[in-house]
Amino acid sequence: MKILKINSSAAKETSIGREQVNGIVSKLLIKYPNAVVVNRDVAYSGLPFPNDKFIEAIFYHGELNKEQQKVTHLSDKLVDELIESDILVIGAPMYNFGIPASLKAYFDLVARVGKTFQYNEHGYPEGLLDNKKAIVVITTGGIPLGSPMDFSRNYITTFLNFLGIKYIEFIEFDENKLRFEEKKKIASQKLESILK
């Protein structure tokens, strides 16, 4: 059993999402005491954005040269971490109505044709990671999830489904500056039901 812990909050010490993610992983370790946790803090990993050399390398047919291998090395490592994991625990604060740029960069680096998805004979993409579960903590200061200003939840669902991950549970910690205690109680109850 491998748990991939992904944090994307820029706040290291005061992040509600990080606190929730750490709490979820701790409870998973009680349920699965022999599990291995891989920590991927995308907010502080210095992840690059895709550029022309990266795009050229990942779609190149044939053996990659040394420069292409160097360009794809980090992406390959992130993809391997993802493929080897059984459960993903993702912290996704809402920044300006969407996910943090660091989390988007991570998603762009792990969306790899032939590794995490493929195209079928009709040209439609099919995810290759259908044996995984994801628990996603979304935090917002004041924006209610599901409102017209929420571009996080549906995007995360679409992206994970694109990779084949269909089992997704959301711990919604939205409007925490307005309804903190209420949201904390709801999040705790939902997590209990997920981990039964």
Image (cartoon, grey):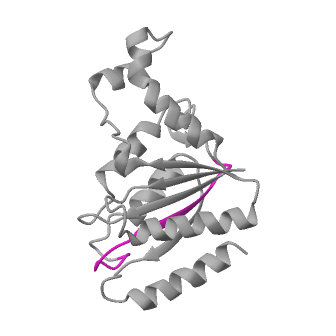
Q: Is residue 131 magenta?
A: yes
The quarter of the displayed image where residue 58 is located: top left
- 22 is higher (above) or lower (below) than 81: below
Q: Residue furthest left?
A: 96
Residue name at image x 53 percent, y 49 percent: 39
Residue name at image x 51 percent, y 65 percent: 21
- 25 is higher (above) or lower (below) than 5: below
Q: Is residue 187 visible?
A: yes
Q: How many marks?
A: 0
Q: Is residue 195 magenta?
A: no
Residue 192 image position (x, y, % from top left) = 65, 79
What is the span of residues highlighted in magenta in the rendered image? Answer: 130-146
Residue name at image x 28 percent, y 74 percent: 148
Residue 190 image position (x, y, % from top left) = 59, 80
Of residues 180 and 164, the one nearer the viewer is: 180
State left or right for residue 192 relative to residue 98: right
Residue name at image x 35 percent, y 51 percent: 43
Of residues 74 and 65, the one nearer the viewer is: 74
State left or right for residue 144 relative to residue 107: left
Residue 196 image position (x, y, % from top left) = 73, 75
